[in-house]
Image (cartoon, helix red, strand yellow):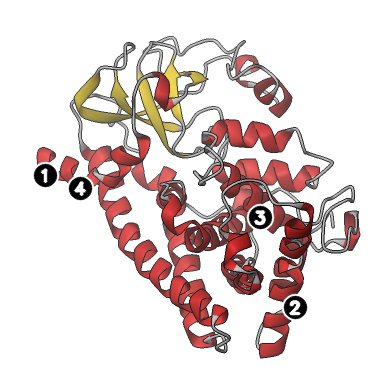
Amino acid sequence: MKKVIKQDNSNIRKDSYDLLTKENDEAPNNPEGLKLLTEEIEITKATYDENLSIVSDILNDIKIEKKIDIEKIQIVAKSLVNNVLKHTDAMLILSRVRKFDDYTFKHSVNVAILTIALGKYLNYPDKEVEILGTGGLLHDCGKMKVPNEILNKEGRFSEAEFEIMKKHPIYGAEILEESAQFDQKSILMALQHHEKYSGGGYPTGCTGSKISTFGMMTAVADVYDAITSDRVYNKALNPFEGLKKLYTEKGHQFHPTIFEHFVYSIGLFPLGSLVQLKNGLIGIIVSVNRNNLMYPRVLVIANETGKMFFMPYIVNVNPPRSEESGKWTMESIFEDNKETKGFAPDEKQGYKVDKVIEPSEYNIDVDFQFNNMQKLIQQIS
């Protein structure tokens, strides 16, 4: 187990944080970083939408008891792996753009993206990452065997309904086993994504090392995406609050080390988080510095009152000059009531995350910003 989740930053593949970094792109009048980000999101968005459509077809086929189209699944899994390996942050940004009307399908793609990103961070071989992607895409396929009146119910399940819902991991594993074409690790992702590290999950209630590593990785990704998504009966938490919620279950519902690696893979301030900087400016996290999570890249979109800028711009949150002031722990962040206290602002410009804020407090639609990135290119050009 320790070998599987060993952390090693030295061989992490270059991602969009490296690709977007320019020496002078912190200047508000320099649009190069914004152009690169916008172009990357537009490229990956086309891939994301295409894969979402294919996954929708596959899951609908399962619902009417057609055989899984293995070739289609492999195409989607390889496409997602290639894009997450090459455009990690752009794909993670797209996974947080929310539309609850196609939740089941989008959730499947998002869990695949999140597990692939986690596998990438852990330096898994590409073949293993592809198995993660396949399992993530199909982890909830058993829900296609749950009656619609239960699956789409608005409100809490009755005890009897919940007992039926709890069978979907078994259904999913059976569907994948029957095809005889899926790796056992992918099958365990479908079977075990609702198991809990300390026990009490379903369908078996197994604990600790009896749950596969891939199963535990899927559990973290599944819950994170679920609680940060708008549902008919559930308002989404913002990405940072979602991580804080998961943190409270570290060591109980989730393997503690896998949870910590998950944070490193998506960011301490997850992509798409709305933040206020020490200088009062408001921005969106658009890239993660995985060498030190306290210093992401931010798309500055508004002043301290929430007034939107005509032209947003990207800044790097600069590490402090004092090595001591750059030290932090997850406990100090997640147990500190949203604010990252105790970190001195950058002496030069004050581009330092002060706190995570709720978009509704400033009437800012984060999804709108990402969905309209192409317009920014037209304004710049």
Q: Please tell me which of labels 4 and 3 falls first in the chain.
A: 3
Task: Please name the residue that numbered disc 1 is placed on.
Answer: 378
| Three-letter code, disc 3 | Leu
Per the rendering, the mark at residue 122 is: 3
Residue 156 shows in the view: yes
Q: Please tell me which of labels 1 and 3 falls first in the chain.
A: 3
Q: Callout 4: 10 Å neighbours few (<14), some, many (20+)?
A: some
Horizontal arrangement in the rendering, residue 122 relative to residue 63 (left or right): right
| Three-letter code, disc 2 | Gln
Q: Is residue 17 above or below residue 39?
A: above
Q: Position of residue 255 (x, y in %)?
A: 80, 47
Q: Callout 3: 10 Å neighbours few (<14), some, many (20+)?
A: many
Quadrant occupied by the N terminus: bottom right
Residue 214 shows in the view: no
* Cβ atoms under marks 2 and 1 closer than 8 Å: no
Per the rendering, the mark at residue 374 is: 4
Q: Please tell me which of labels 3 and 2 falls first in the chain.
A: 3
Secondary structure found at label 1: helix
Q: Is residue 142 above or below residue 13?
A: below
C-alpha gap between disc 4 and disc 1: 7 Å
Q: Please tell me which of labels 2 and 1 falls first in the chain.
A: 2
Residue 227 appears in which quarter of the rendering?
Answer: top right
Q: What residue sits 73% from the left and 52% below the top?
A: 158
| Three-letter code, disc 1 | Gln
Residue 171 appears in which quarter of the rendering?
Answer: bottom right
Secondary structure found at label 4: helix
C-alpha gap between disc 2 and disc 1: 48 Å
Secondary structure found at label 2: helix
Task: Please name the residue that numbered disc 2 is placed on.
Answer: 184
Q: Is residue 29 above or below residue 41?
A: above
C-alpha gap between disc 4 and disc 2: 41 Å
Image mark count? 4
